[in-house]
Amino acid sequence: MEAKYLKIIGLCLPLFLTACGGSGEDKIEVPEEPKASLSISTTIQTRAVVTEFSSGDKMNLFVKNTNTVSSEDYKAGVYASYSGSSWAVSPDVEVQSDVYVFASYPYSSSADAQAVDVAINPQTDYLYSGSGVKVSGQSPNASLTMKHALPMIAFNVAKGGYTGAGKLTAIKVEGAGLYVTGTMNVANGEITGKEQGNYEIKEQKVVEPDGWTEDLPQMFCLPFKSDGSKINVTFTIDGEDLKVALPAQNVAGGMKYLFRMVLTQNGIVALAEQTEVISLNKDTDAMTGATINELGILFVGKEAVLPELTGKGKVSGTVTWGDGTQAAYAFPMSYSFKQDGEHEVRVQAIGATAVEFTDLSQVEEIDLSGF
């Protein structure tokens, strides 16, 4: 009985092999894994001009082998187009290994990840992605958080004894160290200036007694540093150009700086202590009350020594010298005129409630009527 059992097994084995082999029509095929193509999604970290993307927008995608913008491209010439609900990547990028994605907006066919061209005109809101976002075959979607690269400067002007109509038509910012073109690194948003120039915007606003509460005049600029005297702002009001020194401020990328001013009968006064650094999504403002007192002093000779102005908190203001030049008020403060004679000096001070002279030797007359 045992021998018959072994014989049966021996007979069935060739039959099994025949059924499984032969023509190959019954081979088991392992399906290929689907290709993993790069896709992206975006959010905008802060708000300025671009608050959300619109249908038809395009951005540059820099697909790199490592998490450095200087590394070799995994694939070059890649961009993304927005349909209104999602981004389409072109050309298709098959992700076969770990790669890193950087991005910049708006799109430029010649963009370099280390040096994207930026320009002040026409007031473009440049966005960058920051550090590279890692994608892989198992996770090919890059979630990009876009950030604003340029700083903004905004102005609010209130009336302070000015009796004219107060029609503002233009604002111009000029001085050493202002750039109008440059390049941006998409990994950190750092901007390097190239060409220097001035900033200017046109306006159609009327200066209100307490300033504006919304729709403030503002402009994109490139990062710069103001020392409080070398960069000036000219407001064209009622057809007259009124110049004032921009308060000391380090204007850095991705931030908005609100400079508050007061329009008086003798010009514009900067409220340096009320300068505010705010997020880019704010476009409203309510100015705090500021009392401006004006002091007139008639000096005789070639030297002028200003009095000490005191009040609640730090006193700031503008000094208009008898020769037409201006400076920010400080104490102690003196000035040498080029010519001997009489010089009428006006001090417009914010927050001053008291005046103390320490030197009256060159003082001919003191006018406290506006104090």
Image (spheres, helix red, strand yellow):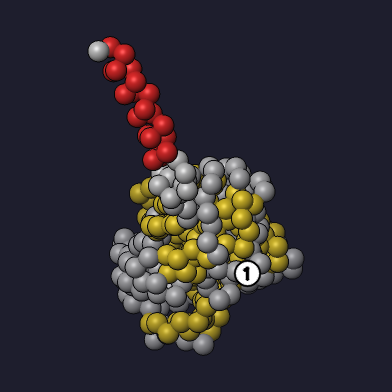
Q: Quadrant of residue 322?
A: bottom right
Callout count:
1
Residue 123 visible from this viewpoint = yes
Q: Quadrant of residue 248?
A: bottom right
Residue 261 image point, x, y percent: 44, 67
Badge 1, how many Cα within 10 Å: few under 14, some, many 20+? few
Q: Is residue 323 left or right of residue 17?
A: right
The residue that label 1 is drawn on is: 109
Residue 279 image point, x, y percent: 39, 56
Amino acid marked by disc 1: Ser
| Towards the viewer: 34 or 111 | 34
* Residue at horizontal 39 percent and vertical 72 percent from the top: 83
Q: Residue furthest left?
A: 1
Q: Quadrant of the N terminus?
A: top left
* Residue at horizontal 66 percent and vertical 46 percent from the top: 71
| Towards the viewer: 26 or 323 | 26
Q: Residue furthest top?
A: 2
| Towards the viewer: 237 or 23 | 23
* Residue at horizontal 30 percent and vertical 64 percent from the top: 286
* Residue at horizontal 43 percent and vertical 61 percent from the top: 258
